Image (cartoon, rainbow, N blue to C red):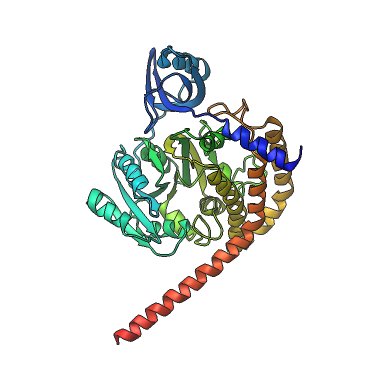
Amino acid sequence: MARSARAQEEIRRFLDIGAVQVAELDLDGDKAVLRPGPGSPPVTHGEVFVLVRRGGQPVGTLLGRVPEGADPRAVLAERARAECGPAVFGEPGEPPFASVVVATRERAGQLARALDSLLAQDHPRFEIVVVDNAPVTGETRELIERKYAERVRYVREPVPGLAAAHNAGLDAVRGEVVAFTDDDVVADPRWLTELSAPFAADAGLGCCTGLILPARLTTPAQVLLESHGGFAKGFTPRTYDPACPPGDEPLFPFTAGRFGSGANMAFRTAVLRSVGGFDPATGAGTAARGGDDLYGFVRVLAQGHRLRYTPYALVWHHHRETWRDLETQAYGYGAGLTAYLTAVLVNRPALLPAFLARLPRGLAHARTLTAVREAEGGGTPGDHDVRTHPWPRRLSRLQRRGMVYGPVGYLRARYALRTAVREKTAQRAQTAQGAR
């Protein structure tokens, strides 16, 4: 098939992807409570992406179809009882004092939704810091002062880039644990408790990540992204220990994308500060396009600290909505991947021998995964082994182009950062001289 014909077929398949409802189903013995997802209307007939809970604890997802005229709760509860296992309950213990950092830029409407969910957390003692990154208007500051007053602290970071914003938040926080999330999420009420409690139970823990599920699946782009896993890392808790590298991760700890994502991560504050925080030449808003979260994971693991993934710390993420968004995301993911690896090796050159030693097995493992993905074609939300939405080849090509660009983007971002620092230093010197 000619490339143009192939592209047209991919576009046709993409446009044929229908919307999917999002809901939560809580099973407690014989009882079942069905609720719409955050911001979603009540569940009706049609396809439904369901987060299944048992006794409030997330245990799995499924994609169900409710026939017209049927009771959605009864239909989905029957499926869930048959397919989703029991919850593994454990007392999380007393969570430490925690700080939540939300970086934002000119998205006050989304930010307000996120802050409302964060202020409803059941954590006994926490603070929220909003970092306004390279703002163009005073909209974010005005929102904080008008609606959230003393409940949220406002920090302005003039240097553009997500990592620079996160570092500004890291400098400002007072908590023993610092959690990071995005302005386009809705946090589950137990999110912060579940994300921070593991630090009290394990003194060697440096980082904890949690579950990210889609808040809405109303556009083809949102459904397609979630069909290929979205940002979810499964429902099995797992601890990554550099003293005992996992056998199924040949490139460990450099396969940082497996550990979690920046919309749902927390660090022991002292540990993150000890490794210098995030590299400000990485992340969205810089020429590197991304990778700041992955950089943080690897630096903490390379320092000898453990990383914990827990599915019980849940945030609902508003995925990007358009095809163009997916193109930008695919290219940015590829660029961020190789940019963060470049950043790690530039800042910790002692890790280069370990990286090169792991590279042959890691590449072979990646080729195997790619072959499986291309052969099977895609997935459906909630059931990633049944593949019905093929991943467009254009997005794969863009991701590969991004990977080639990533190291160049990182070096460009480093140069831009040094230039900005020099200009800021010169401005301060001129101001001080004028004051004399």
Task: Report x, y in % for residue 50.
Answer: 46, 25
Task: Report x, y in % for residue 286.
Answer: 52, 60
Task: Report x, y in % for residue 132.
Answer: 37, 57
Left or right: where does residue 393 sit relative to residue 27? Answer: right
Relative to residue 171, is residue 180 depicted above or below? Answer: above
**Quarter of the image containing the N terminus?**
top right
Res. 35 image quadrant: top left
Task: Report x, y in % for residue 115.
Answer: 32, 45
Left or right: where does residue 244 sit relative to residue 96? Answer: right
Residue under the point 35% across and 47% down: 111
Relative to residue 173, is residue 396 depicted above or below? Answer: above
Furthest-bottom residue in view? 436
Residue nearer the viewer, 212 or 390: 390
Res. 427 image quadrant: bottom left
Res. 5 image quadrant: top right
Residue under the point 65% across and 36% down: 10
In this view of the protein, can residue 365 be seen by the observer?
A: no
Residue under the point 52% across and 68% down: 416
Furthest-right residue in view? 1
**Quarter of the image containing the C terminus?**
bottom left
How many marks overall? 0
Residue nearer the viewer, 188 or 20: 20
Relative to residue 229, is residue 27 depicted above or below? Answer: above
In this view of the protein, can residue 43 be seen by the observer?
A: yes
Relative to residue 268, is residue 240 depicted above or below? Answer: above
Residue nearer the viewer, 389 or 162: 389
